[in-house]
Amino acid sequence: MIIVGDNASDIEMQAANEIADYLENETGNKPLIRKHSEIIDEDKRNYNLIVVGTPKTNPLLEEVYAMTNATRVTEEFPGEDKGVLEILRNPWDESKAVLLVEGWDEIGINNITELKDSKLIVDKEFFELKVIVTFGKKPQKGALVKIQSFETQKLIAEKRTDEKGIAVFNLPRGSYYIVATYKSYFLQLSPYQGEKSVNLTSDTIVEITLRGGM
């Protein structure tokens, strides 16, 4: 089921319809498109969900933020005219999934292209990937962690580490390439960086040590 805000813009509705058409072509089943006011709690439990919109236009995003560790889109991240795709366990039924198609503004949603990875949410088992980023044996807050497909190098998700140097993702079984970077704005140095690959078949913890900065 695809959920949009009650006052979704034309761009948001176009994105929802394009996703529905794509999934129909890939799976033979076209998901329902519903406005936020039209859904009930049972719908949240019974379906894989695709939430399309901005925090200002779709209240369901705020519900997901409150119940999960999803990346909250803001004016600072990803910023104006940029969008985010994030796959999570469905917080109302963890045997199902939620795909967030979100941006700080509608242009950000419009700029999310090549949504072919949305097929990953269909009948997939999800696991928690916890990435711990350190520098000099200490946790690094604010490092940007990017998760890419190992096969295609396509960006799957990204978020910044918390005060403990941790970023948590919920991802389908598969192989991923993890890149962590951190740039100090107080020192005129190149970004610190670390990387690892992982074959995700269960809940996994990966530690990445940042190097560089010369």
Image (tube, helix red, strand yellow):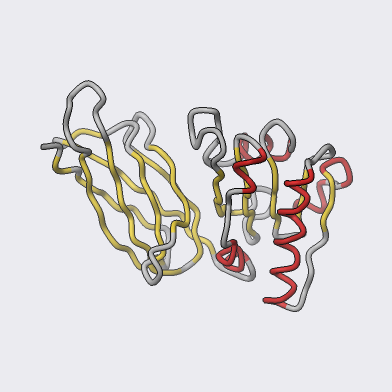
Q: Position of residue 174 (x, y in %)?
A: 43, 69
Q: Position of residue 172 (x, y in %)?
A: 51, 64
* Res. 1 in view: no
The residue at the point 56 percent across, 51 percent down is 85
Q: Does 195 sit above or below residue 25? A: above
Q: Does 51 sit above or below residue 103? A: below
Looking at the image, which is closer to me, 84 or 114? 114
* Res. 83 in view: yes
The residue at the point 71 percent across, 76 percent down is 25
Q: Residue furthest top?
A: 186
Quadrant of the rendered image containing residue 22: bottom right
In which quadrant is the N terminus drawn? bottom right
Q: Does 200 sit above or below residue 88? A: below
The residue at the point 74 percent across, 38 percent down is 58
The residue at the point 47 percent across, 51 percent down is 157
Q: Is residue 189 left or right of residue 121?
A: left
Looking at the image, which is closer to me, 12 or 96? 12
Number of callouts in the render?
0
Q: Is residue 173 left or right of residue 55?
A: left
Q: Does 104 sit above or below residue 195? A: above
Q: Residue furthest right?
A: 38
Q: Is residue 209 left or right of residue 205?
A: left
Q: Position of residue 93 (x, y in %)?
A: 68, 54
Looking at the image, which is closer to me, 197 or 52? 52
Q: Position of residue 48 (x, y in %)?
A: 70, 60
